[in-house]
Image: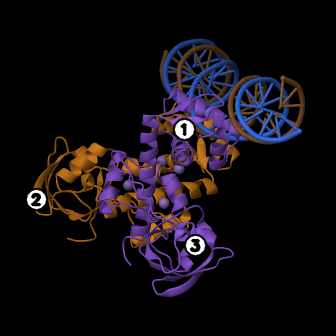
Chain colours: A orange, B purple, C blue, D brown
Amino acid sequence: MSTHVEDYIKNIYKLQGEREKVTTSSIADALSVSAASVTDMIKKLSDRSLIKYMPYQGVELTHSGRRMALQTLRRHRLWEMFLVEFLNYTWDEVHDEAEKLEHIMSTDLEERIDKALGYPKHDPHGHPIPTRNGEIIEDDHPSLADLGINDSGVVVRVNDISQSLLQHMASIGIHMQSQIKVLDVVQFDGSMRVLIDDNNVFVSRQVARNIFVDIGGKK
Amino acid sequence: MSTHVEDYIKNIYKLQGEREKVTTSSIADALSVSAASVTDMIKKLSDRSLIKYMPYQGVELTHSGRRMALQTLRRHRLWEMFLVEFLNYTWDEVHDEAEKLEHIMSTDLEERIDKALGYPKHDPHGHPIPTRNGEIIEDDHPSLADLGINDSGVVVRVNDISQSLLQHMASIGIHMQSQIKVLDVVQFDGSMRVLIDDNNVFVSRQVARNIFVDIGGKK
DNA sequence: AATAAGGTTTAGGTATACCTAAATATTATT
DNA sequence: AATAATATTTAGGTATACCTAAACCTTATT
Ligand SMILES: [Mn+2]
Ligand SMILES: [Mn+2]
Ligand SMILES: [Mn+2]
Ligand SMILES: [Mn+2]
């Protein structure tokens, strides 16, 4: 319903991936509000049966909470894709706009955008777009940091945790479907020299951990 | 700032066109809220210097209020145009979406959409789109109801007062730039038989009053 | 088992935007 | 000029979503 409810639910969904029970403080962190505000809100979400809540024990999405989370995620990712495909946004520019637009999307608009984009399966960062029915296929690819010398593959996903990370990745030539091959790994700090579409670049371990590669795809 | 403030200001701007001073009850009507709520809000708008307000004497936009109104109108009309051009919406389907989207548009997004559309001068109903700098050119065309037998012209604007009116106009073949010629006017009720792009159709006076025609354009 | 530290909730408050009912001001009618 | 009708404002209240400070639980450490 409201933008705030949707953002809470979406963030609880994301946090749930990491641990089963989601704590008050982790939600407060994610949304940059006080823990007291979160307690207020999770009571309301619980009243609406979007989460299961036991005081002091953390929070868990219900079935209908999960549905709302996936719908919001779907809309977010469709908007991101739309901004990139139709308005020439780059992948580091889309998040904030999509964060607002995701709450303003009738089912009709959602379907028209989906259609105009040709029913994309992934957003500009390679994240899967949940289906209309709330199905999502989380692919499980190794990060670049997991590869060794001479391993190679295709970039299929990056983490969109920060704008500056996304900008940096773009600046060294990393895009969706970039060919990537590990040339050398520095023992000391895990940093790498890699070939990206035939360009020789240096990647810190911190960055490498946020790039995910399909190693079955190409050799 | 907030969606509510923007909607109040935009509606005051529209009402101002009709009379100088805008009354509490006309705003209440336009926004479907109680008169008491309007009194609440106009005090706040006055505190923010968006309107000039004298209790019991009605309301008037200040310079910065007018600027906000025109910016909101610009964004509304750009979104309407965008929905029509990029997502195959028809002119009767765009208003409600645009009413929400107009509040979610950074200056950057506004300019990208403007550019993607080729800097349009009018929205899908023929209403002028204010410029980035808050200039607006209100064209002054006669309505179809003002024309007599054998007068002709080109449809350049329609009123978007209701979805069913827009649907009806589309169903009888009226679009922007349609050629229109009056064949016959019924004395009794002012209804007309007209030629629209070579189609012979009947138009009630009520409908004719909401269609605006450029008679200088073509003969 | 007691205490200290950390996380969570409660208490009390703010801001926005709405409501109904009652009071009051303006305008129209006699 | 007084009265009646209508419009507007005030008074008192609701719902959402925040906040800080204080109280309270849970968990870890001794
Ligand atoms: Mn959001
Ligand atoms: Mn994304
Ligand atoms: Mn609006
Ligand atoms: Mn319009």
Q: Which residue is mark 3?
A: B167
Task: Give left or right: position of A178 versus B195.
Answer: left
Q: Is ligand 1 less than 8 Å from the beta carbon at label 1?
A: no
C-alpha span from label 3 to label 1: 51 Å
Query: Can residue B134 be seen in this snapshot?
Result: yes
- Image quarter hosting the C terminus of chain B: bottom left
Tell me the mark number nearer the camera, choosing from 3 and 1.
3
Residue B97's spot in the image, x, y percent? 52, 59
From what the image shows, is residue A112 above or below residue A8?
below
Tell me the mark number nearer the camera, choosing from 3 and 2.
3
Residue at (49%, 57%) from the top-left corner? Answer: B98
Q: Do tag 3 and tag 1 residues touch (Cβ < 8 Å)?
A: no
Answer few, some or many: residues within 10 Å of disc 2's Cα (few below 14, many 20 plus, some between 14 and 19): few
Q: Which residue is mark 2?
A: A199
Answer few, some or many: residues within 10 Å of disc 3's Cα (few below 14, many 20 plus, some between 14 and 19): some
Q: Find residue A67 and report its image quarter.
A: bottom right
C-alpha span from label 1 to label 2: 44 Å
SS class, disc 3: helix
Nearest the viewer among B179 and A146 is: B179
- Labels 3 and 2 positioned on one and the same chain: no
Badge 2 amino acid: Asn
Q: Find residue C3 and report its image quarter.
A: top right
Q: Do tag 3 and tag 2 residues touch (Cβ < 8 Å)?
A: no
Q: Earlier in the sequence, mark 1 or mark 2?
A: 1
Task: Give left or right: position of D18 versus C1.
Answer: left
Residue A219's spot in the image, x, y percent? 20, 70
Residue B145's spot in the image, x, y percent? 56, 70
Residue B60's spot in the image, x, y percent? 53, 36
Q: Which residue is mark 1?
A: A23
